[in-house]
Image (cartoon, rainbow, N blue to C red):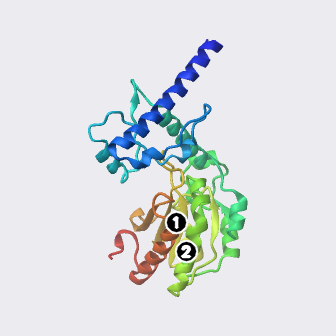
Amino acid sequence: MVNENDLRTIIAQVLSEMNLDQKEDTKEAETSGCAACSNEPVIEDGCIPDVTEVDIRKQYLVENPVNGEAYYDLKQYAPCRLGIGKAGARYKTDPVLQFRAAHSAAQDAVFSDVDQDFIDKMGLFSVQTQCDSKDTYLTRPDLGRKLSDEAVKTIKEKCRMNPTVQIYVSDGLSSAAIAANVGDVLPAIEQGLKSYGIDYGTPFFVKYGRVGAMDQISEITGAQVTCVLIGERPGLITAESMSAYIAYKATVGMPEARRTVVSNIHKAGTIPAEAGAHIADIIKKILDNKASGTDLKL
């Protein structure tokens, strides 16, 4: 067991190390030209900055680099955990805390549900797949591709049949992605379709949905093009990545190659509002060519 005095010593050493790292980062920024590193906030009173707010593309913690400026420039094009340095045989405390925070955010994104208030605010009605819980959803992907009987009935009652385009939203593997992006992406798609004179059906939300559920929804609604905005599996760079899967006259059991995908929709990737306009443009091209996925020749 660690006694109280030893614990205080350990804490003091960690805080001392992080203060040292901060000073070295600033010094390195001054000598290597990494100006962004010098803007890191100074640690005061034993507190550290919010590790979730750190832009890892602008963080360079390698001590005495051979060519720190060139390495730092390369980091701007790759949001990966590179150049994080080491303290002896282990990683420095700051990157470790960032890693753990990112891992926690990823878990929260997978295991949390999309807030019903957000769904209501977007004006979406909700239906559910044959999954009865998050555990079932994660262990039975096949059930996430099939709508419940009640969902089928609700869609037939509330959706306009045979629209040119049917758009819907699904939680997928990241509730955080839906909350962060749909508010900008969905209106941008609708605005883009209106500008092209393309009609679209009633949007709605599918709980515990997999991408393949769009095939059944396409058959039910009779839409020429079906588009689902769905949360992607979160990683340790972001837990808020969303994708749009689009298919022309999708049918149950069709090859995955018939889907067109717009991925990496998030604030540090494809900007949500821009993604919406791009998706609307792709839908128009799919309608013009009457094909999607690998069949779409642009």
- Marking on residue 108: none
Amino acid at the residue labelled 1: Pro
Return the x and y of residue 2 as percentages of the image width and height. 61, 13
Residue bearing the label numbered 1:
272
Image check: 121 left or right of 286?
Answer: right
Crowd around label 2: few <14 · some 14–19 · many ≥20 (10 Å): many
- Asked whether 285 or 15 is in front, the reply is 15
Return the x and y of residue 87 as percentages of the image width and height. 41, 27
Return the x and y of residue 13 as percentages of the image width and height. 53, 22
Q: Secondary structure at mark 1?
A: helix
Can residue 198 be seen by looking at this rendering? no
Image check: 202 left or right of 294?
Answer: right
- Asked whether 283 or 182 is in front, the reply is 182
Q: Secondary structure at mark 2?
A: helix
For marks 2 and 1, the one nearer the N-term is 2
Residue bearing the label numbered 2:
188
Check the image and report above or below for 228 versus 112.
Answer: below
Amino acid at the residue labelled 2: Ala
Q: Across the whole image, how many numbered discs are drawn on residues? A: 2
Q: Quadrant of the N terminus?
A: top right
Return the x and y of residue 291 as percentages of the image width and height. 40, 76
Question: Image point 47% across, 72% down: which residue?
Answer: 279
